[in-house]
Image (tube, rainbow, N blue to C red):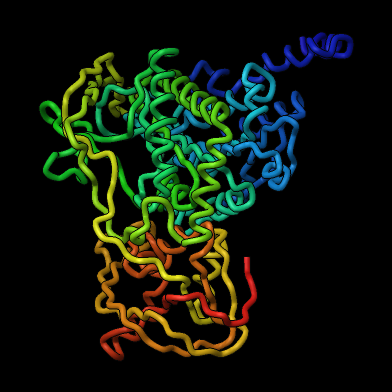
Amino acid sequence: MKRVAALVCLLVLPLCSSASVNDLKSRAERSNYAETSRYADVIEFINELQKLSPSVKVESFATTNEGRELPLVILSRPAVSSPREAALSGKPVVFILANIHAGEVEGKESAQHLMRDVATGPLAALMDKIILLVAPIYNADGNERIDINNRTAQNGPTGGVGTRENAQRLDLNRDFMKLESPEARGLIDAFNRWDPHVVMDLHTTNGSYHGYHLTYAPPLNPNTDARITSFAREKLLPAVTRALKAKHNYRVYYYGNFVDPQRPTSELGGDRQGTPKAWATFDHRPRFGTNYIGLRNRLAILSEAYSYLDFRARVDVTDKFVRSVLQYVADHAAEVVSVIREADRRSATSGLTAGNEEGFGINFELKPSTKPVDILVGSVTRTVDSRNNRPRLQATDEARPVKMAEWGEFRAARRLSAPAAYLLRPDQKPVIDKLLAHGITVEVTRREETFDVERYTVKTVARAQRPFQGHREAKFEVVKADAQEKFPAGSFIVSMRQPRAPLAFYLLEPESDDGFANWNFFDEETDRAMKENSSAVFPVFRLKAAPATPREIRR
Ligand SMILES: [Zn+2]
């Protein structure tokens, strides 16, 4: 058969490519959705796709702990070969991130189907409006640990799935701020270079038995530019929700879990008793990718296919959701580019973003809806997998609307003014290297100088009892006072007049719940000083005005 096809190809070229496209299938398709793709399957799929279309380019954006190169596929027409060319095209750049949790595998399959249809098929016209970047297998090391004992409650694939964590046992969707994995460092470097306007992060739910095929979330941190959040909440997500219902009869809504209305931060999980009374979203902290992207002044969409739908249905709804978002971005390309540019402009001129004129939030709380909302309640049936005696859950058709309180957004419980710049001494190079990894611009002073600063004194440090991601997260209690401090040449200035100011604020403030202090970067020196003097000077200082001292720019 193959030889005949090759011969026909030589004679009739157009037939050749269409015949080959029909041969190009993901492992999910080839196995009738019994199995998910291995790393080698994904690489082979990309190689074959490249042979079919000049619109497909590939780069490697990271090497995992176990030595796997992570592919980033660039789909564009006319084809671009560099971030510079992508920026010059004026089109929005959209980044699809799949398989960050390697047990949640439908994003990886739908990403392959999407690339095929964009590169060679019915979705090619998208490339006239957007540039598409796809990272189909982010947690590649976790993916290769496929086992029928992973995520056993999930409704397939029966051939098993990978692990949540990478080879270091880190959850990559908690590593966006501290960047301790080679995967996250490579991904942020790709974000810095390609600077995508929109990022989609593809997952599968855990927990509550709801009546949606897929749930979604925009960036949830209140320090995100309000125009980005409202573009997502008031325009893109409602339009996509309507389109999925009208075209495919899919029910999609904001991500949540059923919670105790008295304690909305504690999930009730799947095995709740009685009718649920409240629905709450997950978390405001930027250790989660979509919240992190928001602090970079970019639009992010979290996609969570419902765990108890069968594998084929989860791939399909993820596929339809991603395509619908891409179509909306393509149809509103100029608006997307302008919302992002405006957010960057505000950060670069004032350090703040729209909605944060009185300073950035430093403590946050869930915000209840003003009135009860119809949330669809679902149910599941159970079968036992005879291979491991573990229950597998299947969604029923139930989708019963129940009016209940919704905690779908966060608000700042306390705000803090942003300084004109942060100032750090030369011994803080490890912290500075992390800032540079996040694409934050740092300047280096060229002479010794005394500055008027705001200085934090650390009063207490409370460390979490339970270790998390190899850390015992630290909560700093500080007081701020004006002071004069001498800084040697080679000290670091982090201006807050730059596009990534909201991210710099979150990383550097001592009371931040996801910054360097939280992740123990300052523990050693703080502990030492507190032992000696019962208090410690926090090594990040605040400047009220940008100093006129000579300095060099680092990137
Ligand atoms: Zn996940």
Above/below status of 242 relative to 368? above
Q: Is residue 434 left or right of residue 382?
A: right
Residue 417 in the image: state x and y as whole percent: 35, 66
Q: Nearer the viewer, residue 207 or 493?
A: 493
- x and y percent of residue 327 in the render? 54, 25
As drawn, 283 above or below 242: below
Where the N terminus falls, by quadrant? Answer: top right
- In the displayed orientation, state which residue is furthest to the right: 11
Can residue 116 be seen here? The reply is no
Nearer to us in this view, 81 or 223: 223
Q: In the rendered image, which quarter is residue 506 located in?
A: bottom left
Task: Classify the position of ligand 1 by quadrant: top left, top right, bottom left or bottom right.
Answer: top left
Quarter-of-image position of residue 154: top left
Q: Residue at x 18, y 43 (%)?
A: 264
Numbered marks: total: 0
From this view, report whether residue 318 is shown above or below residue 549.
Answer: above
Question: Between 251 and 45, which is closer to the camera in this rendering?
Answer: 251
- Residue 155 visible, this angle: yes
Which quadrant of the rendered structure holds the C terminus?
bottom right
Q: Residue at x 35, y 61 (%)?
A: 359
Q: Residue at x 57, y 40 (%)?
A: 337
Residue 122: image location, x then y, percent: 63, 16
Q: Relative to residue 198, is residue 211 drawn left or right? A: left
**Residue 167 horizontal/vertical position (percent):** 49, 50
Query: Which image quadrant for residue 40?
Result: top right
Q: Residue at x 65, y 34 (%)?
A: 43
